[in-house]
Amino acid sequence: MVEGILAGLSTAFSIQNLLMVVAGCLIGTLIGMLPGLGPMSIIAIMIPIAIQIGDPAAALILLAGVYYGAIFGGSTSSILINAPGVAGTVATAFDGYPMARQGQAGKALTVAAIGSFSGGTIGAILLMGFAPGLATVALLFHSAEYFALMVVGLAAIAAFAGSGQVAKALMMTVLGVMLATVGESALFNAPRFTFGVYDLQSGISFITLAMALFALPEALYLVLNPKRSEREGNDGGKIANLRITREEAREIAPVIGRQSLQGFFIGVMPGAGATIASFLGYAVERNIAKGEDRAKFGKGSIKGLAAPETANNAACTGSFVPLLTLGIPGSGTTAILLGALIALNVAPGPRLMVDNPSIFWAVIISMYLGNVVLLILNLPLIPYIAKLLEITRNYLIPFILFFTMMGSYIGQNNATELLLLTGMGLVATIMRMAGYPLAPMLIGFILGPLLENNFARAMNLTDGISFIWQRPMTLALLVFAVVLIFLPSIRAGFARLKGDEAARGD
Amino acid sequence: MTLERAIALVFILICLIYGYTAFVVMEASILPFERNLAFLPNVLPKWLSVVGVLVGLAVLIQSGSGTGGQTADDDIDIGNLRQYKLGQAVLLLVLMIAYALLLRPVGFLTTTTLFLILGAMILGERRYLVLVPVALLSAFLIWYLVQEVLGIFLRPWPWFV
């Protein structure tokens, strides 16, 4: 192993490869900021260039740099304009955007950068130590457990909702899952719920829904209420203030530690990786937090921003475990990387570590490098990125609207998406006015297909729903999900009891 | 009736239509040999429609008690929509629809430039000497990035060019 690490070090630290990391991070960050171009599409676009390089280690290092850069770039648009371009950064917008609105955009970006850095680095360390062992554990998870895991993910939504909002949050989740069933799915090659509309056959795209639910209502709110665009304390001084105080650092350190571990282990399991990791990370931290801290979640909590950012980067690193050790891609992005690897004449799998140790280790070392370079590149850039928010309203709003439309148009090259976007955006705005939470809908939409596919597979394997009690792990996860749903009401009940006692005491 | 309850009612209606499709329409289209399969395309939709109606009813009952529906301080007060710039918002939405319909036939550069100029004008921008160059330049830059650098096709000019 030591020999391998040394070989990897010497490969990764060649001048050519260092340049590759820098270039990859820069390209990834810049393109990743455009909503609609997530890591998956950017890597797909970069593959021809990577193949032309010829050297597999250098190509992979470039792609890994692009990957990290794109994830960070995606967080930027979530934080600044509430437009999450990738499923993994949806949870980042929950607290990142409120922070930006309070004039703390610079700080929010810094926390995101630090969270990503720590998550990625700790993930890489874990990857080095556990890769071979974890690969076998990940295989223990069958479709039944994945189904149960998705149910836990959906149930965790109840944890996002405030008191009295649980029913509404569940309603939005159901609506999201329903929207996800529109169109053709991979399992049954017949269109469902398209009501004869040809353009719905390919379903509603994630990016269109994300833009319609987050960015568009926000832009419309800004139009409706001009006072909203005047940020609190927007005197130019605060945006530049990106230092984190010592107390804040102490506050987020345990969050980053926990979420690096949790995110990594969720990422190892082939499946929704970074997305699930970020949602669960947010939900867990919100449940652990006490009193005032918990009330701050969703209103610009620094912990609520650090949790999903750390978890999603740790999960991205974790998703390399099945790819490099088993040759199984755990996510769309790693699937594209797998394609690139094969095109470069490298076959990932159990033999990779033995046959091509320098490639295996060079990739892992380049993960550290990528994270460091990203931090060095981006920290000085943050004040300038945050300045974007100081553009006057008359220019900012048309540009936000335009970018949301570009986001949903580039992906599908279909102008009908834009009509869908406008229609759903209007509905979403009305729902937001009525006090319905919109995030659960998007989570339902993302997890819905995964839930159904795994449910179907488990049902087909056991010819019925007997898998629920035949597999203890599934049962345990499902019980956990039920507990999660009822936790808020149980808690409220306890609080009421306590309140009654206090009242009697008086 | 509050907007909150109205939305819950509409949602229940949607669930009923969805459920009808799942229980009746899709059931009829299942082929004979498929009936033995454990999992069919309408298994999850059936569950969803039932759960949806239940949850919708729960929201309907809860929102009546007056505890729900409290919005944060900086949110829009729906009881008094007239104090907001509704006109601008509607115009911008119309502009977006126009953009969607014109993007393909008229081409990316023209529609985008027009969208940015008109959008800013709706919001009250009157410094045309700044606005027009900014719109032109950004439209071109984004087109260049997407089409030439990234290689994603975007028709730049109207169909007759």
Image (tube, coloured by chain):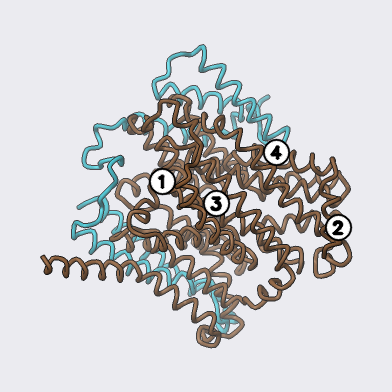
Label 4 sits on residue: A27
Q: CA distance from mark 4 to mark 3?
A: 20 Å
Q: Which residue is disc 2 drawn over?
A: A358
Report the chain holding disc 2.
A
Identify the mark nearer the N-term, 4 or 3: 4
Question: Quick one: which residue is furthest to the top in this view?
Answer: B129
Chain coloured brown in this rendering: A
Residue identified by numbered label 3: A309
Camera-side mark, 4 or 3: 3
- Could you tell whether A69 is left or right of A285 in the image? right
Instruction: Report whether residue A479 is seen.
Output: yes
Secondary structure at badge 3 equals helix
Mark 1 and mark 2: span between their CA atoms? Answer: 44 Å
Q: Secondary structure at mark 2?
A: helix
Image coordinates for residue A55, horizontal then vertical, percent: 88, 49
Q: In screen coordinates, is B60 left or right of A322?
A: left
Above or below A309: residue A484? below
Q: Is residue A100 left or right of residue A113?
A: left
